[in-house]
Image: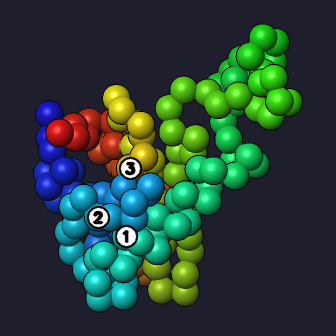
Amino acid sequence: MPGIDECLTEAMTLPGARGASLVDWTSGLALGTAGESPVGDHETTAAETAELARSAAEFDTFLATDDDAGGTGGAGGSGDDGRPEKAGGPPVEDLIVTTRAGYHVLRFVETSFDSSVFLHLWLDRETGNLALARMRLRDIAEKLVLG
């Protein structure tokens, strides 16, 4: 099973990859980096992308419910306070931000502890393949071993 460095190296083999990192979205710290940073500093990029990830993970609009996971909408559909109950795993699978020059793909990683990390891949818009990047990041996230 590959670790952080191996997974980031694999992400950098994607067409158009300019930079990759593994970020803890609760602290905003980069746990590993490869390639370039859009602002020239991986720590700044990690903190800024963590803000975006945290927003998506915490807003009720984006919470996964049992219904999203193929449930019937019966028991477990909403909690005692009327808010949707979270389904297992990270609340969001991925986020995509499109800029004039590229794509930023944030793929949440399901871990055995609190699932508060994501892979961030920065792709060149001209040479990157967004569909391929999403599929490959999903595979990389599934085999990533933290520890």
The kind of secondary structure element at disc 2 is: strand
* Vertical comparison of 27 with 41: above or below: above
For disc 1, the marked residue is 46
How packed mark 2 is, by other alpha carbons closer than 10 Å (few <14, some 14-19, many 20 or more), is many
The N terminus: image quadrant:
top left
The kind of secondary structure element at disc 1 is: helix
The C terminus: image quadrant:
top left
Give the tally of numbered discs: 3
How packed mark 3 is, by other alpha carbons closer than 10 Å (few <14, some 14-19, many 20 or more), is many
Q: Amino acid at mark 3?
A: Val
Q: Amino acid at mark 2?
A: Ala
* Depth check, front residue: 124 or 24: 24
For disc 3, the marked residue is 117
Q: Compare marks 3 and 1 and give the one earlier in the sequence.
A: 1
In the rendered image, which quarter is residue 121 located in? bottom left
* Depth check, front residue: 64 or 113: 113
Q: Are marks 1 and 2 in contact (CB under 8 Å)?
A: yes
Q: Residue at the right extreme?
A: 82
* Vertical comparison of 129 with 81: above or below: below
The circle drawn on residue 30 is: 2
Q: CA distance from mark 2 to mark 3?
A: 9 Å
The circle drawn on residue 94 is: none
